[in-house]
Amino acid sequence: MNRRHGLTAALNRTPLSRRNWMGLAVGSAAVMGLAACSDPGSGGTSDGAEPADWPSPTGKLDGVTLTFWAAQSSADIPKDVVAAFTKETGAEIEIVTIPDPYEQTVQTKVATGDMPDLAMWQPTTSMLTSLGAAERLQVLDGAPWEANTVSSVLEAGGTLNEHRYAAFVSAPSVMGVWYNKRVFKDQGARIPTDFGALLALARDLKGKGVTPFYEMGGEWWASQYVVQVQLADAAKDGLWDRVNSNQDAFTGTDIQGAIDQYATMIKDGLYNTDIKTGTFDDQAKALLNGDAAMAIHVNSLLSNMAAQTDAEALNETIGFFPISAKGAMATSIPEQTNAVVAFKTGDDTREAAARQLLTYWLTDGYADFVKGQNTVSIIDGVETPDSVPTAAVEANEALSNSVGSMQSLAIANPDLAKNLGDMIAGTKTPAQVGEETQSQFAQLAKAIGAEGF
């Protein structure tokens, strides 16, 4: 299912690409093989080397050819930048669309030695580890664009063992509550200040005959967001560090408690009656039409809604607010559409040219990029276009008080969303969700050599 390109690169997703990063299959040999190459406790790159130089963004590169891998959901994102860079430098760059499932396909190729010069990639701990960042990716420490990148964006990911391996080109997605402004106004609803207040509001709306939340249980990949937003405060207090060292677990008080709360919300009828079959498109339509007041999701929901209405109607109808158990802390979740990595190919000229493209993208070429993508700017001095939806701006502002998601902070990415989808379908209990997710996490952690497993 293709979405209209152009609202914002950070928002354009497909359900298939979303499933790709929802969880690394426990039995995937490619994932295990790559992950085993990168010890999460090793500290730094395999040789400690940093890029030798950062070339001028428009220096001539006649005769240099680069390969750029992207997913079906991100292949259009670098096109205009690459075209402009090619015109300026004389380099030739081939953008190759890798078939879905993107992440698994890339990992399999890289494991066999087939590597591009650059690739769109999810800049999270688990996904950088699974790619063998220390051995296979160029270190981007001290890049000329780093000082001008919004600090909340840099803090959202891209690093492993205190080295930067991924360059953000757009703002990471944020988990939170997308709501219908008209429903809120009609019902006299106020923006909740914590998850308890959110539940109180939901019960009040239900009592007035309004469906509080819409969940797309028929496409389980979004089911994890309700759980993860509840974990933001605990994550800030080191939850994922404890899980990573086997001192806490998905069956522990915080995560299992969030799973249980989600199950209670469903049991109490705070969701759409067709929760087991509801789809991504159904969710977008329900929120736009006011058939539901809220949906807990990420920026891709806004992209879907934007594809179904015009900009004026979207701004009049849809808003965003962050939520967490104890307050209004957002949960960031960078995706492969948000960032680029550069590979160690062994060819010094091509490696330098790859760094040069990243520099051009985030300096000389960035103003045109944000206009073309109609996206929020992450570079100081480059203005966000007025045409960017207000809800997207609100979500981006929430990054200033945010914490990383499971994907960002955990060393492995189990199938939490799939297991929650099974809970919605009635084939798993909340306890079984916690138990199976923990079992998957432990297997993945052990495969990458994490201590304590």
Image: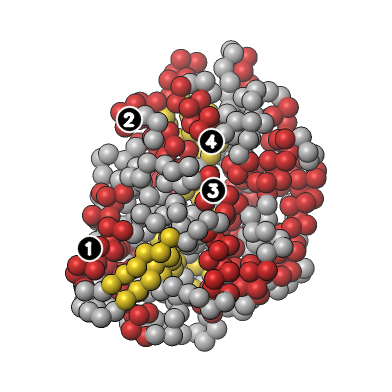
Q: CA distance from mark 3 to mark 4?
A: 11 Å
Disc 3 residue type?
Leu
Taking the spot 24% from the left edge, 55% from the top edge, the residue there is 367
**How busy is the neighbourhood of tag 4: few (under 14 within 10 Å), some, or many (20 plus)?**
many
Residue 344, quarter of picture: bottom left
Q: Earlier in the sequence, mark 2 or mark 4?
A: 4
Disc 2 residue type?
Asp
User: Which secondary structure lies at badge 4?
Assistant: helix
Mark 2 or 3, which is nearer the eye? 3
| Residue 283 location (% of width, % of height) | 53, 31
User: Which secondary structure lies at badge 3?
Assistant: helix
Q: Earlier in the sequence, mark 2 or mark 3?
A: 3
Q: Earlier in the sequence, mark 2 or mark 1?
A: 1
Q: Relative to the observer, which residue lies in front, 265 or 350?
A: 350
Q: Earlier in the sequence, mark 1 or mark 3?
A: 3
Quadrant into which the C terminus falls? bottom right
Q: Which mark is residue 412?
A: none
Q: Which mark is residue 280?
A: 4
Q: How many labels were placed on the picture? A: 4
63 on left or right of 41: left
Residue 318, quarter of picture: top left
Q: CA distance from mark 2 to mark 3?
A: 25 Å
Q: Which residue is mark 3?
A: 16
Q: Relative to the observer, which residue lies in front, 203 or 277?
A: 277
Query: In the picture shown, does residue 380 fall above or below 147?
Result: above
Taking the spot 26% from the left edge, 44% from the top edge, the residue there is 385
